[in-house]
């Protein structure tokens, strides 16, 4: 009996490491399964994006916001940017006169988050090339054809860009795309028209300069006229204040002062005016 008991104790001690190793394997397997499930069900949507859930062709209406989200295993998450982006377009388009002008246009737009699922189902991920590019080219042609080339070269170009923006806003809003602004970056007119416009601007500047010169000369003439009138008024006032008696009195004062001078003088008095006449002064 003692031998049998010792043998069983030895067998139990030998089986203990095996059971411990199996226990550790089960824990490791459980951890692996948990991590695998987390990997399959958790997804990260970057900042400025939203996620559309595609479960084997079935698109969910629930849009995933930016951050960590939990989804059903096997679900593919398609990410869409909702940040403001820019599309550039260069086009050679005719004006209302039939002249061909080259325009560089930029469109600022963004996708509304709630419309991401609808865009994915109806258009796809490359909706910019499918929807926005053709609409922008069409808007550039339609709006430019309504204006003369001079409107694109002057300050009125802002009106042209605003009309393009209205066209794009009306075309993109029903699809869940928000047009923010249309910018005319560059306008290239035909060389002959550019030369004619520059010559016209130079002529207008020359005319403005001549008008400035004429205004300045006119003001100078007015100033001289006012000055002459002031002198005339002064002389008239002085003339009214001078009488024959005053002149005779001043003549007597002059003769009196001359008599005090040590120099020899010949003074003739008694002419018709009564004023002294100095004949010599030595």
Image (cartoon, rainbow, N blue to C red):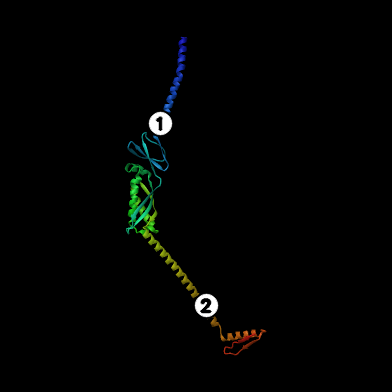
Q: Is residue 150 visible?
A: no
Decide if residue 115 is on the left or right side of residue 269.
Answer: left
Decide if residue 22 is on the left or right side of residue 132.
Answer: right
Distance from disc 2 to disc 1, alpha carbons, whole Å, reads 109 Å
In this rendering, is residue 5 above or below 155?
above
N-terminal of the two: label 2 or label 1?
Answer: 1
Q: Are marks 2 and 1 in contact (CB under 8 Å)?
A: no
Mark 1: give few (<14), some (14-19) or many (20+) Cα within 10 Å.
few
The residue under label 2 is 231
In this rendering, is residue 117 above or below 73?
below
In this rendering, is residue 73 above or below 156?
above
* x and y, in percent, of residue 154 in the image: 39, 59
Q: Residue at x 40, y 61 (%)?
A: 198
Label 2, secondary structure: give it.
helix
Label 1, secondary structure: give it.
helix
* Residue with the most extreme front position: 191
Decide if residue 223 is on the left or right side of residue 154.
Answer: right
Pick the front one: 141 or 182: 141
* Residue with the most extreme right position: 262
Q: Residue at x 44, y 66 (%)?
A: 209
* x and y, in percent, of residue 15 in the image: 45, 18
Pick the front one: 60 or 25: 25
Pick the front one: 268 or 47: 268
* x and y, in percent, of residue 11 in the image: 45, 15
Q: Residue at x 44, y 20 (%)?
A: 18
Q: Is residue 10 visible?
A: yes
Q: Which mark is residue 36?
A: 1
């Amino acid at each position: 009996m003692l031998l049998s008991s010792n043998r069983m104790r030895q067998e139990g001690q030998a089986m203990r490491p095996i059971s411990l190793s199996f226990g550790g394997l089960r824990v490791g397997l459980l951890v692996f399964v948990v991590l695998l499930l987390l990997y399959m069900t958790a997804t990260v949507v970057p900042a400025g994006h939203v996620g559309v859930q595609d479960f084997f062709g079935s698109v969910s209406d629930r849009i995933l916001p930016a951050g960590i989200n939990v989804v059903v295993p096997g679900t593919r998450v398609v990410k869409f940017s909702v940040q403001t982006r820019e599309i550039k377009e260069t086009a050679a388009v005719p004006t209302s006169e039939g002249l061909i002008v080259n325009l560089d246009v930029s469109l600022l737009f963004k996708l509304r988050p709630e419309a991401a699922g609808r865009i994915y189902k109806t258009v796809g991920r490359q909706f910019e090339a499918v929807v926005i590019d053709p609409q922008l080219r069409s808007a550039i042609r339609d709006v430019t054809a309504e204006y003369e080339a001079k409107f694109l070269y002057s300050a009125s170009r802002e009106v042209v860009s605003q009309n393009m923006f209205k066209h794009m806003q009306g075309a993109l809003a029903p699809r869940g795309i928000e047009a923010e602004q249309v910018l005319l970056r560059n306008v290239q007119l035909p060389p002959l028209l550019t030369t004619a416009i520059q010559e016209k601007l130079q002529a207008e500047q020359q005319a403005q300069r001549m008008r400035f010169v004429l205004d300045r000369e006119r003001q100078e003439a007015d100033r001289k006229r006012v000055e002459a009138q002031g002198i005339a008024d002064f002389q008239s006032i002085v003339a009214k204040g001078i009488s024959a008696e005053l002149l005779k009195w001043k003549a007597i004062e002059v003769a009196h002062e001359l008599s005090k001078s040590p120099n020899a003088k010949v003074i003739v008095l008694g002419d018709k005016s009564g004023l002294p006449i100095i004949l010599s002064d030595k």
